[in-house]
Amino acid sequence: MLIAIPAEVLPGEFRVAATPETIKKLIKAGHTVRVESKAGQHAAITDTAYTEAGAEIAPHPAALYQGAQLILKVRAPLAHELPLLPERAALVALFDIHRYDHLDALNAKQISAYALELIPRITRAQSMDVLSSQANIAGYRAVLLATQYYPRFMPMLMTAAGTVKPARVLILGAGVAGLQAIATAKRLGAIVEVFDVRPATREQVESLGGKFIEVALNDDEKAAAETAGGYAREMSEDYKLRQALLIDQQARLADIIISTAQIPGKAAPVLIPEETVSGMKTGSVIIDLAVDSGGNCPLSRSDEVVRSENGVIIVGHSNLASLLAADASALYARNLLTFLSLLQDADGAYAPHNDDEIIKATLLSQHGEQLFGRAPAHTQ
Ligand code: NAD
């Protein structure tokens, strides 16, 4: 196949969908790879590095897409990218599909589109799970971002000028991002407390040195907390009240909150309401990773820093992985490479494994027909 790797155009998107490492493997498998000039500039990859890996460099998008059969991207094409896309090509990217407006335009071009965020979190798909590889980075970067706004040290220090207390970090949601945030905050010497609705996360939290705080659950609630796929379920109103009280108490003691709570396909749960923020300490910091799905804190705004009346700093960064563009691209590109094994036959020709549950879950449109709208496998 002729594979095209464009430069990303979404503002703030610094990642790229292929690295010299993955390009060497694609070429070894018999493909031709064309990369748009400067596609890797923010991810510390030069055009020369791509050329040395065996890729062709295209000076502009029109030259890049000519004859391309497969397009590997980080973000789904924006309106102004659509006219240049070749008809009947396959396209693999993160679509943020519930908010993507251009599926009709892709159908009109008979483009087969695959949304990587719909890859089910099953064991076999772990090596292609871009949401996990990128959330891991976001969890790490969220803690570093908090240190930029927090006006104190993270670790305890004993100095001749007196003792500095360690920061108290509260992490809401112990999924992929939350677990990496725990590990990072611990490495920086903070005291880390963690809350998650899934009791099963306690062991992981404790193995990273976090203190698991919990709402007491009755047996029915324990059984209901997690889906068969390992995701959180929405809990009862009574549970939510007890949870709100617990988080409110802990938030007032915290110096930093990293909130990562989500239930797939739903708006993020509000865990840090305005009343809780108003009870928090001046100078404390909230990093709301769920900002783009409504936010765990209603005061957070996408890509803005908000200061509450009582001096709490609330940061809503929508693309933390992009701030670590080199490693984020390296992991994303490896995820993609594994995913591609489901799109080709033994000779490397485009032949999607349409019966595979991963392809079924991710395929948005094929031969001009929109397929998105079937229940995705991972929410069942
Ligand atoms: P995940 O599904 O692995 O983890 C989410 C966790 O939240 C789960 O452990 C779940 O049990 C928990 N949870 C759900 N409801 C809760 C509640 N009411 N109280 C406490 N915990 C609750 O997800 P992830 O991959 O770690 O991503 C976490 C969030 O971060 C998502 O909203 C994701 O979109 C977002 N994210 C943001 C960025 C960014 O740059 N801003 C990057 C990656 C991920």
Image (cartoon, rainbow, N blue to C red):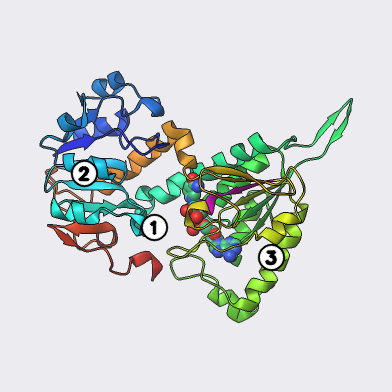
Which residue in the protein does label 1 denote? Answer: 123
Amino acid type of the residue tagged 2 in the rendering: Leu
Q: Vertically, is 217 above or below 298? A: below
Q: Is residue 321 left or right of residue 112?
A: right
Q: From the viewer's side, name the closer residue of 74 and 327.
A: 74
Which residue in the protein does label 3 denote? Answer: 214
Q: Is residue 171 visible?
A: yes
Q: Nearer the viewer, mark 1 or mark 2?
A: 2
Q: How far is disc 1 from disc 2 in space, using C-alphas?
A: 34 Å
CB of residue at label 2: within 8 Å of ligand 1?
Answer: no
Q: Where residue 337 sits in the image (x, y, percent)?
A: 28, 42
Which residue in the protein does label 2 denote? Answer: 82
Q: Where residue 71 sits in the image (x, y, percent)?
A: 21, 41
Q: Is residue 99 left or right of residue 258?
A: left
Q: Image point 61% across, 41% down: which residue?
A: 143
Give the farthest residue toward the front. Answer: 309
Taking the magenta stretch, the answer to whether it contains residue 102 is: no
Q: Main secondary structure of the magenta part?
A: strand
Taking the magenta stretch, the answer to whether it contains residue 288 is: yes
Amino acid type of the residue tagged 1 in the rendering: Thr
Circle 3: element type: loop
Per the rendered image, the range of residues in magenta is: 285-290
* Picture mark count: 3
Which quadrant would the C terminus be assigned to in this image?
Answer: bottom left
Which quadrant would the N terminus be assigned to in this image?
Answer: top left
Q: Where residue 327 sits in the image (x, y, percent)?
A: 44, 34
Q: N-terminal of the two: label 3 or label 2? A: 2
